[in-house]
Image: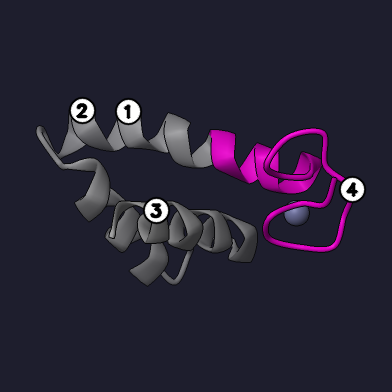
Amino acid sequence: MKCKLCDKKATDTYCELHKRAYCNVIEKYYVWKMAFFEISWYNYLIEVVKNEYSGSRVKEVARDLLSEIE
Ligand SMILES: [Zn+2]
């Protein structure tokens, strides 16, 4: 099985690196929710993709999650 976002081997949807990025996205969502009160999952993902400080893998994961919502 291949990672959904790159050519690396994956046991799940994502490879180890993208899985780690995915965990970062989830974790940060809770931090953001506390800072910005009720930011929606969708708006949060938009912010992650727009943020120039987000890592490239984090952005790939966020974009992928967004495509599942839209
Ligand atoms: Zn990957």
Extreme residue in the right direction: 9
Residue sitting at x 68%, y 39%: 19
Using the numbered discs, state the Cα–Cα distance from disc 2 to disc 3 in whole angstroms: 24 Å
Q: Secondary structure at mark 2?
A: helix
Point out the quarter of the image occupied by ligand 1.
Answer: bottom right
Pair 2/4: label in front: 4
Q: Residues within 10 Å of mark 3 (few under 14, many from 20)?
A: few
Which image quadrant is residue 22 in? top right
- The answer to whether the residues at label 2 and label 1 have Cβ atoms under 8 Å apart is yes
User: Which region of the structure is painted magenta?
Assistant: 1-23
- The answer to whether the residues at label 4 and label 1 have Cβ atoms under 8 Å apart is no
The quarter of the rendered structure image containing the C terminus is: bottom left
As for residue 16 lying within the magenta part, the answer is yes
Tag on residue 30? Answer: 1
Label 4 lies in ligand 1 vicinity (Cβ under 8 Å): no
User: What amino acid type is highlighted by mark number 4?
Assistant: Lys
Residue labelled with disc 3: 68
Label 3 lies in ligand 1 vicinity (Cβ under 8 Å): no
Using the numbered discs, state the Cα–Cα distance from disc 3 to disc 4 in whole angstroms: 22 Å
Which image quadrant is residue 13 in? top right
Tag on residue 17? Answer: none
Tag on residue 9? Answer: 4
**Does the magenta stretch mainly form a helix, a strand or a loop?**
loop
Residue sitting at x 54%, y 54%: 61
User: What amino acid type is highlighted by mark number 3?
Assistant: Glu
As for residue 42 lying within the magenta part, the answer is no
How far across and down, in percent of the image, does residue 35 sit?
19, 35
Query: In this rendering, is residue 56 above or below 24?
Result: below
Q: Secondary structure at mark 4?
A: loop
User: What amino acid type is highlighted by mark number 2?
Assistant: Met
Using the numbered discs, state the Cα–Cα distance from disc 2 to disc 1 in whole angstroms: 6 Å
